[in-house]
């Protein structure tokens, strides 16, 4: 989920704020997202199960996504990203309910 969500944030930044910034942030955001999952996995192996970094990455990325959605789109059908955001929220709800 993180590997898909972080490029989505970079895409929204590129589409709604600045293309160069979005392209520059793409590998950075992917690395941060993957790093948060690796850190979570390593903490699980130690028996700690520390989700703070993973949760922070998800929260701040979601806030960036929502903020970007408030900006006007450059292209037609920019509102389709609201559908994608809705699916992400549904995925987070289902993840929270997963045992």
Image: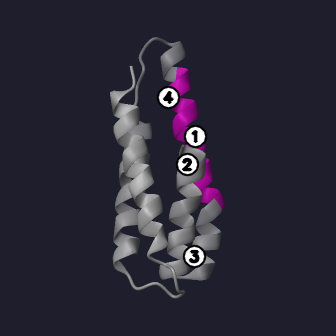
Which of disc 1 and disc 3 is earlier in sequence? 3
Q: Which residue is mark 3?
A: 21
Quadrant where the N terminus is found in the figure: top right
74 falls in the magenta region: no
Instruction: Report the magenta stretch's main SS.
Output: helix
Q: Secondary structure at mark 3?
A: helix
Residues marked 3 and 2 touching at CB (< 8 Å): no
- Write the residue at 54% across / 87% down: 75
Which of disc 3 and disc 4 is earlier in sequence? 3
**Residue 35 shows which numbered tag?**
1
Q: Which residue is mark 4?
A: 40
- Report how far apart the C-alphas of labels 4 and 2 lie in the structure: 12 Å
Q: Secondary structure at mark 4?
A: helix
- Report how far apart the C-alphas of labels 4 and 3 lie in the structure: 28 Å
Callout 3: few (<14), some (14-19), or many (20+) C-alpha neighbours within 10 Å? some
Residues marked 1 and 4 touching at CB (< 8 Å): no
Q: Which residue is mark 2?
A: 32
In this orientation, which residue lies closer to the viewer: 28 or 79? 79
- Write the residue at 64% across / 71% down: 23
Span highlighted in magenta in the image: 27-42
């Amino acid at each position: 989920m993180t590997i898909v969500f972080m490029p989505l944030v970079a895409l929204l930044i590129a589409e709604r704020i600045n293309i160069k910034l979005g392209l520059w942030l793409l590998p950075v955001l992917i690395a941060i997202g993957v790093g948060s999952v690796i850190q979570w996995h390593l903490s699980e192996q130690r028996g700690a199960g520390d989700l703070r970094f993973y949760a922070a990455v998800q929260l701040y990325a979601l806030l960036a996504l929502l903020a970007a959605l408030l900006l006007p789109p450059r292209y037609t059908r920019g509102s389709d990203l609201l559908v994608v955001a809705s699916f992400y929220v549904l995925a987070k709800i289902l993840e929270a309910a997963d045992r």
